[in-house]
Amino acid sequence: MESSTSESSNTYAPSYSNRDPGMNVPVHSQQNLAPLSPYLNFDPVYLPQSQPEFIFPEGAARQRGRFELAFSQIGVSCMTGAAVGGIGGLYNGLRSTTLAGHTGKLRRTQLLNYVMKQGSATANTLGVLAVMYSGFGVLLSWGRGSDDELNTLTAATATGLLYKSTAGLKKCGIGGAVGLGLASIYCLWTARDRLQGFRQEYNPA
């Protein structure tokens, strides 16, 4: 009875050993090559290592355009303006209420007024500038069919000119110069790797 039970168990659950020819799975495709995967049975050395991690639709750009970036730029500008303006309003409120001798609820109310007023004003200013800059950038990108540093410089200069256009010709020129200067600094910062490559190419050590 026991022998029949052991024979039936061996039939349905045979034992394996390293001497079984079916268990001799090669771990190398050839001698001195990378090990093979016992599951996929291919040499990993033939896999390309420089392919992008994400799949892009055919014909799509590999980075977000100015229209996609416009929403984040406007939002970040508004939040930054609110934070900077709020800190400035808190400082001015503390100084003004101290000089006026306000205390208690009156001082807290005045501090909140300063923070909210100056924070909203600064957020509105930076938000308007971001909308102008993004609009000019999108129009230039669509009109020229490319997105490069020239669009950035032109959009920033036009934004400064338009923002100060109602303050007179002199201040309008100053606004354009400020926009051009800030855009130039940004372009030099983002293109520092290319500039360093050009410098090494034309001035080899």
Image (cartoon, helix red, strand yellow):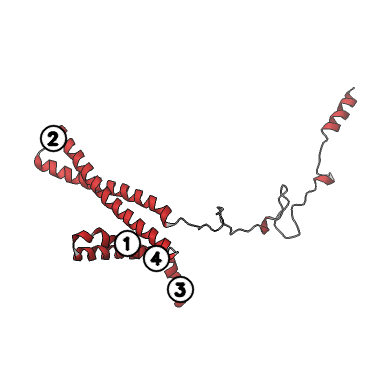
How crowded pointer 2 is (Cα within 10 Å; few <14, some 14-19, many 20+) is rated as few
Label 4 and label 1: CA atoms lie apart by 11 Å
Q: Secondary structure at mark 2?
A: loop
Tag on residue 103?
2
Tag on residue 149?
4
Label 2 and label 1: CA atoms lie apart by 45 Å
Q: Quadrant of residue 200?
A: bottom left
The amino acid type of the residue labelled 3 equals Gln
- Using the image as rendered, state which of residue 131 and residue 3 is in the foreground: 131
Q: From the image, which quarter does the N terminus lie in?
A: top right
Mark 2 vs mark 4, foreground winner is 4
Please name the residue that numbered disc 1 is placed on: 156
Task: Answer with left or right where residue 139 lies relative to residue 161.
Answer: right
- Using the image as rendered, state which of residue 38 and residue 139 is in the foreground: 139
Task: Answer with left or right where residue 6 lies relative to residue 62.
Answer: right
Q: Are marks 1 and 3 in contact (CB under 8 Å)?
A: no
Label 2 and label 3: CA atoms lie apart by 64 Å
The amino acid type of the residue labelled 2 equals Thr
Above or below residue 111? Residue 58 is below
How crowded pointer 1 is (Cα within 10 Å; few <14, some 14-19, many 20+) is rated as many
Please name the residue that numbered disc 3 is placed on: 200
Mark 1 vs mark 3, foreground winner is 1
Q: Are marks 4 and 3 in contact (CB under 8 Å)?
A: no
x then y, percent, for residue 165: 23, 61
The amino acid type of the residue labelled 1 equals Ala
Task: Answer with left or right where residue 6 lies relative to residue 33.
Answer: right
